[in-house]
């Protein structure tokens, strides 16, 4: 993913899971060295609506100890009202405009890329996943999207601080 973004001179915001940062610090450092932005995506990728407040906030704080960022994106887009109120006191909550669905193994890379091309517009936050599970679709969809929108004169930026 980093190589593809570099090829298109594109910057992104990576919402990272603390466990993965801990397991792969050199990859996390590569993200930062390549000029990308990072955000907190919890330490263990837990679902807010299925987790009590204390456990959820603790998971966010564990990730925040490793990932210095004002941004937070909840896994699955799932938060309770009280979790939301607590999160926005400490972080800039970031949701998305277009989900690529590259994590769905029953979809093709072309499906994911075309979905983004159909739905995205200027200034949208688009979610792709940099996981092993999503990679077979990501490696097709991301270049499709970058190529399509580059030809239209768009450029790709990380979230501004």
Image (cartoon, helix red, strand yellow):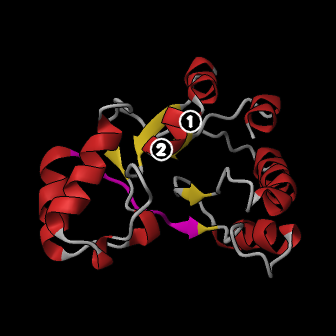
Element type at mark 1: helix
- From the viewer's perspective, tell me whether residue 42 is left or right of residue 3: left
Q: Is 119 located above or below residue 136 in the figure? A: below
Magenta stretch: give its range.
91-98
Residue closest to the eye, 150 or 130: 130
Residue 154 spot, x, y in % from top left: 69, 44
> Would you name the residue on which mark 1 appears?
23
Picture disc at residue 19: 2
Whole-number angstrom distance, CA of label 1 to CA of label 2: 6 Å
Residue 27 spot, x, y in % from top left: 64, 29
Residue lying furthest top = 33
What residue do we see at 71% from left, 75% from top? 104
What residue do we see at 39% from left, 64% from top? 46
| Residue 81 included in the magenta stretch of the image | no
- Please tell me in which quadrant of the rendered image residue 69 appears: top left
Q: Is 46 located above or below residue 123 in the figure? A: below
What residue do we see at 72% from left, 67% from top? 102
Residue 124 at least partly seen: yes
What residue do we see at 60% from left, 28% from top? 31
Residue 150 spot, x, y in % from top left: 78, 44
Q: Quadrant of the N terminus?
A: top right
Residue 92 at least partly seen: no
Element type at mark 2: helix
Q: Quadrant of the C terminus?
A: top left
Residue 40 spot, x, y in % from top left: 38, 45
Crowd around label 2: few <14 · some 14–19 · many ≥20 (10 Å): some
Labels 1 and 2 touching (C-beta < 8 A): yes
Residue closest to the eye, 153 or 64: 64
């Amino acid at each position: 993913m980093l190589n593809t973004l570099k090829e298109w001179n594109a910057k992104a915001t990576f919402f990272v899971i603390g466990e993965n940062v801990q397991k792969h610090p050199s990859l996390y450092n590569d993200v930062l060295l390549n000029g990308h932005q990072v955000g907190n995506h919890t330490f263990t990728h837990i679902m807010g609506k299925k987790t009590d407040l204390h456990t959820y906030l603790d998971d966010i704080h564990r990730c925040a100890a490793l990932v210095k960022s004002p941004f937070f994106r909840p896994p699955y887009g799932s938060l309770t009202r009280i979790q939301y109120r607590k999160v926005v006191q400490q972080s800039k909550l970031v949701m998305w405009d277009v989900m690529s669905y590259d994590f769905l193994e029953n979809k093709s890379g072309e499906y994911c890329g075309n979905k983004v091309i159909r739905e995205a517009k200027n200034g949208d936050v688009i979610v792709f996943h940099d996981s092993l599970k999503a990679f077979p679709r990501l490696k097709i969809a991301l270049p499709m999207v970058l190529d399509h929108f580059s030809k239209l004169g768009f450029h790709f930026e990380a979230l501004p601080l």
